[in-house]
Image (cartoon, rainbow, N blue to C red):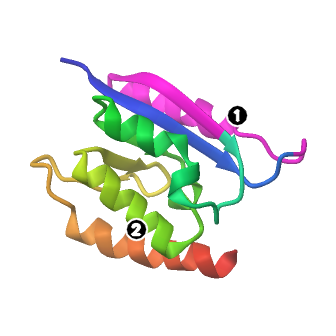
């Protein structure tokens, strides 16, 4: 059975200055190299501070049978530490592992348990994203 994933790309600005093309292309290439089937692509032009309830990608990942959420970097998931950690918790409860491309890491181990090292890194990086905001 082929593993399934959703790509999520986000930029903060809705003007022509930023777009999600590079994020999506890079994640598609990665998925092909890993024999992962992309079942949906979400691209948003919203602030990283938006609440989880405003992100359709989380609902899509947790209600459909996907194995992975692919991100170019953790800050694409959000720039609020609390919201990022809540998002990860929701995804992990649904057995969805998050792949963070710039780190080359998955948040869940092969046995479905949270990778403790990645957990520490994501908490720290989420806080750094919050401070950058």
Give the residue displayed 50% in from the left and 59% down from the top: 74
Q: 59 above or below 128?
A: above
- Binning the other alpha carbons within 10 Å of mark 2 as few (below 14), some (14 to 19) or many (20 upward) gives some
Q: Furthest residue to the top?
A: 1
Q: Which mark is residue 75?
A: none
Q: Position of residue 39 (x, y in %)?
A: 43, 22
Dot 2 and dot 1 residues touching (CB under 8 Å): no
Quadrant in which the N terminus appears: top left
Residue 29 is left or right of residue 116, and the answer is right
Q: Furthest residue to the right?
A: 16
Give the residue displayed 63% in from the left and 60% down from the top: 50
Residue 119 in view (yes/no): yes
From which residue to which does the magenta span run? Answer: 15-43
Residue 128 is left or right of residue 82, and the answer is right
Q: Position of residue 104 (x, y in %)?
A: 39, 52
Q: Which residue is mark 2?
A: 85
Does dot 2 land on a helix, a strand or a loop? helix
Q: Which residue is mark 1?
A: 21
Q: Position of residue 106 (x, y in %)?
A: 31, 52
Give the residue displayed 71% in from the left and 59% down from the top: 47
Q: Is residue 58 magenta?
A: no
Q: 114 above or below 58?
A: below
Q: Is residue 36 magenta?
A: yes
Residue 73 in view (yes/no): no
User: Whole-Å distance between the Cαs marked 2 and 1?
Assistant: 26 Å
């Amino acid at each position: 059975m082929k593993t399934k994933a959703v790509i999520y790309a986000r930029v903060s600005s809705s003007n022509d200055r930023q777009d999600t093309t590079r994020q999506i292309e890079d994640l598609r290439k990665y998925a092909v190299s890993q024999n992962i089937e992309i079942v949906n692509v979400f691209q948003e032009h919203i602030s990283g501070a938006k609440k989880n309830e405003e992100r359709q990608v989380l609902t899509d990942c947790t209600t459909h049978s996907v194995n992975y959420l692919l991100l170019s970097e953790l800050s694409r998931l959000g720039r609020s530490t609390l919201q990022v950690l809540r998002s990860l918790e929701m995804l992990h409860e649904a057995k969805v592992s998050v792949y963070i491309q710039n780190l080359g890491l998955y948040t869940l181990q092969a046995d479905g348990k949270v990778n403790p090292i990645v957990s520490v890194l994501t908490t720290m990086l989420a806080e750094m994203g919050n401070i950058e905001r």
